[in-house]
Amino acid sequence: MSETDRLLVVEDLSTTFTTPSGRLPAVSHISLSLDQNETLGIVGESGSGKTVLARTIMGLQPRTNVEVTGSVLLNGHQMVGVSEAEKRNYWGTDVAMVFQDPMTSLNPVMRVGRQIDEALRVRMNMPKDAARARAIELLELVGIPSPERRYRAYPGQLSGGMRQRVVIATALACSPQLLIADEPTTGLDVTIQAQILNLIDELKERLHMSVVLITHDLGVVATRTSRIIVMYAGRVVETGSTRDVFHRMRMPYTRALLESSPKVTSPSHTRLHAIPGRPPNLVNLPPGCSFAPRCASATQRCHEERPELEVDSTPGHAFACWNPLPIRPERVA
Amino acid sequence: MSSALDEVLTEVQTDKRGPLGPLFWVCVGWLGLNVFGAIFANILPLHDPLFGNYNAISQGPSARYWLGTDDLGRDIFSRIVYGSRISIAVGTGAMVIGFGVGAPLGMLAAYRRGRFDSILTSFMYILLAFPAIVAVIAVLSFWTPRSMFKIIVVIGLASIPLVYRVIRTATMAVATKDYIIAAKVQGATDRRILMKELLPNIAPIGISFLLIGVATVVTLEGALAFLGLSVNPPTPSWGNMINEARTVLAQNPWLVFFPSLALCLFLLCLNFIGDRLRSHYDVTETKL
């Protein structure tokens, strides 16, 4: 498949904010691509630039104090440096987004049905009745019981899980080809989390969408994605097929992330591994590897020189590290 | 999926808002009565507010003169009803100007941000730095002859920065919410977002500020009338009635009492309605 046939091609994308304390490179020099019907996982801890990356791909930047360079080709449409009016043509139909917190991503004073059929009426010029029928269909599709009644409900009358389903329904309204889910389960409790993730998975298959799943939980992406990008301090530090990243991880940060999630197989009262220190201040990054100050295997070189992404033995698997972990045949997870 | 459980939970959470309460409706009724009186004062069977009956000077309340007469023998009840015209017209007229200009600008500035917002907001804050009442007094002192129209315009213009600030802040709190971005990425235009997403969310704050604004302007008109800067006598307004009655306070206390009572009740009702509506419609405060 050639580059132009791909659904999403991001090249050398950087998003820099101008803050009172200096320039803040929230996303620097990221390249990635996504095929039809593929799921890409973007993993990293809070503040690693996942959300900014997602919003930049969507073309959602604040109107001021931000500079975006590079290229985002979505279905062949350039999303960087074009007017909002133009991006509006692609929003909804080419790409849609599920937000982090269903408590704030629905308008509290609008009936949920109207929030869904609004998109249909504005973007697809559907007549009122048809939009209503389609909205009820969508509510049913995302597994909301008695959708005719919920159509008239206000967001405050629904539980968190139900609300996130409604958010997904609004995102699906114009049948997008790419769905970006930005930590779609953060605001929900664990049992609902799995339901929502399975729902996204199932909808992806049924509607032939591609999905970008953003999370800080490696466990979430393990079974649901075909490829993974691990981000740290606005950069990609490891990328590859889900299998490679899990079984042949080379970047100490990836391992640290994995070790910091609890495992069912560990005996009870096992202490969780926390990554020491905190993510670096992006305004003045260290000259070397951004992870070096928190890395157990850091050497002098790590502090002085920044490692670039380097392709590993398996094609498609790349990592940015001077002292990569040895490849071991053993299973890590 | 446990749809039965969800069903139950949804039912539990379905929360009908409580009633607004009888006091609210009493206040609405009282305001309605005031407005009705102001509009139909000409048709209602009232004494002429300007006619002095020299056979009935400075009388207390009686069957003929319900609230008594003043030192020129004019019927106080009819003067209060006619006086409400000035208060209500000035209060609503000034707020129509203030909101008509201040609210759209405030919403636009909060939604657009950037240079437009910085320049406009700095300008408004400079205006806010002037003591509005002093400015209003100064302008009205020189812009003669005074008419109700001029008073409405001056107070209306003076209220624009205040309305702007409140609406801008309220809009800003909403404009950064995810659902605004969500609406945007569903293809909603700026105009649609402003009218359909932002406006309903700031309406409760806007309406209560509007009512309290009317109350403030009515008080301000009273203060101006007291200083002799409102409509010229003998046209009655609540403020100038209090002012005129002040000189005979010792002899005729009810001359001050009744217009003051009318003013107080009017303001109390406005404030109460505004406050009640705010807490009633504040979805975000209680429900989410």
Image: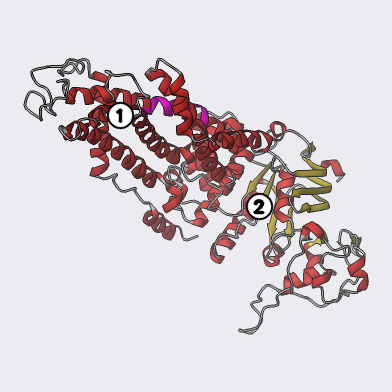
Span colored in magenta: B91-103
Could you tell me which secondary element the residue under label 2 belongs to? strand
Which residue is pictured at 48% across the width and 33% down the height? Answer: B132
Residue B93 painted magenta: yes
Task: Point out the image quarter for the C terminus of chain A.
Answer: bottom right
Name the image quarter holding residue A68: top right
Q: What's the CA distance linking mark 2 and mark 1?
A: 62 Å
The relative height of residue A88 versus residue A189 in the rendered view (above or below) is above
What crowding class fits label 2: few (fewer than 14 Cα within 10 Å), some (14-19), or many (20 or more)? many
Q: Nearer the viewer, mark 2 or mark 1?
A: 1
Residue A17 appears at what percent x and percent y?
Answer: 75, 48
Colour approach in the figure? secondary structure
Q: How far across and how far down the image is residue B268, in percent?
A: 29, 40
Q: How many marks?
A: 2
What amino acid type should be assigned to the residue bearing mark 2? Answer: Ala
* Residue where numbered disc 2 is placed: A181
Q: Amino acid at mark 1?
A: Gly
User: Tag 1, which secondary structure?
Assistant: helix
Q: Chain of mark 1?
A: B
| Picture coordinates of residue B198, whole percent (x, y) | 53, 38
The residue drawn where x is 43% and y is 40% is B204
Q: Nearer the viewer, residue B283 or B52?
A: B52
Q: Which residue is mark 1?
A: B239
Work out whether residue A30 or residue B93 is closer to the camera in this orientation and state it: B93
Whether residue B140 is in magenta: the answer is no
Residue displayed at 55% across by 46% down: B173
